[in-house]
Image (cartoon, rainbow, N blue to C red):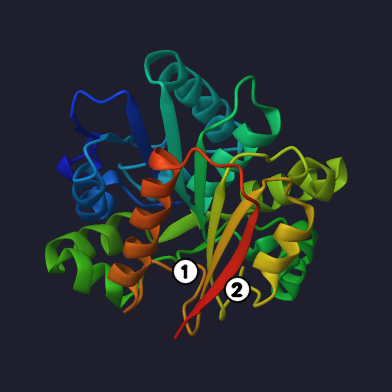
Amino acid sequence: MQATEYSKDIFISNNSDTCVFLFHGLSATPYELKDWAARIAELKVDVKVPLLPLHGVNSELLCSAETADVFYDWGFDYINDLKKNYKKVIGLGISLGGGTIFDYLVNKVEDLDGAIMLGTGGFVAWDLGILTWLVRIFNVKAIKNPLINEFDRKLLGDEYFDWKMRLFPKVPVKMLMKALHKQKKEGLEQKMRDIKCPILIINGTTGLLTERTSISQYFEFISSTKKYGLLVEGATHTVHKSKFNQQILEHILGFISEVIDSENDDKVEEIIVLE
């Protein structure tokens, strides 16, 4: 079975020396970010939305991932290639895509010019500790996909929703838990101190992998002088799949514009609650 049109990479060229790349989340596709990509491109930057490894075909292929390194190593090379070809590179990542950007930021050769991460609340979520324990005790490798909801249908239509429900009923959970355990063992808090570029973190307040205080706890350790947070009331880990989708995008556009235009080094730490 081959990847479909939903899984094709997106590239919008403005012949710019600035590139904004978007990494989708687990079991998602570039197609889910097509509208955001088009709006970001209106800032006259180049925009790239690649398909992450093992995605875009079915759950069987996706669940063949033994470790998250298959995504992290690919992301590291992808971003380094962008750094060679653009003056400024700004990254946006959702869930697994955000984790891939995070891994780059703490292991980088050169820094990003800005980073936007959605759905990053996992490291302080109490529920996540329970799930990690269950996965390790019962050797659970995959679970029913919790990352598809009615907003997939509302934002992208019935055909895409039905395609995703049919082909991605499961996601690899053991692989994710191993990655989180590795981060904790290696010292997640110390790793965050290596993040120095302007950063925008966007999290929901409800559901597994989400915790209301996660943004402020991240900010306690991240070394960036410009730290922006957006806490979305009632949204889950898939925070962009909510009624706030367009409002979230407006904040993202504002952050990207500031990174492109700003030349000052003023210290900023701001968390906005969207409700």
Q: Secondary structure at mark 2?
A: loop
Q: How many marks?
A: 2
In the picture, measured across the screen, residue 244 lies left or right of residue 103, that is: left
Q: How much space separates mark 2 and mark 1, taking CA atoms? A: 9 Å
Q: Are marks 2 and 1 in contact (CB under 8 Å)?
A: yes
Q: Residue furthest top?
A: 84
Residue at 63 percent of width and 35 percent of height: 105
Mark drawn on residue 146: 1
Q: Is residue 111 above or below residue 240?
A: above
Mark 2 or mark 1, which is nearer to you? 2
Q: Nearer the viewer, residue 139 or 235?
A: 235
Q: Residue 20: give x, y in percent of width and height.
A: 36, 37
The amino acid marked with disc number 1 is: Pro
The amino acid marked with disc number 2 is: Leu
Q: Quadrant of residue 129?
A: bottom right
Q: Is residue 273 above or below residue 104?
A: below
Q: Quadrant of residue 66?
A: top right
Residue at 78 percent of width and 50 percent of height: 181
For the C terminus, the image quarter is bottom left
Q: Quadrant of residue 268?
A: bottom right
Q: Residue 104: give x, y in percent of width and height.
A: 61, 32
Q: State whether residue 269 appears in this view.
A: yes
Dot 2 alpha-carbon crowd within 10 angstroms: few under 14, some 14 to 19, many 20 or more: some
Residue designated by label 2: 208
In the picture, measured across the screen, residue 105 lies left or right of residue 48, that is: right
Q: Nearer the viewer, residue 174 or 183?
A: 183
Specify which label sits upstream in the sequence, 2 or 1. Answer: 1
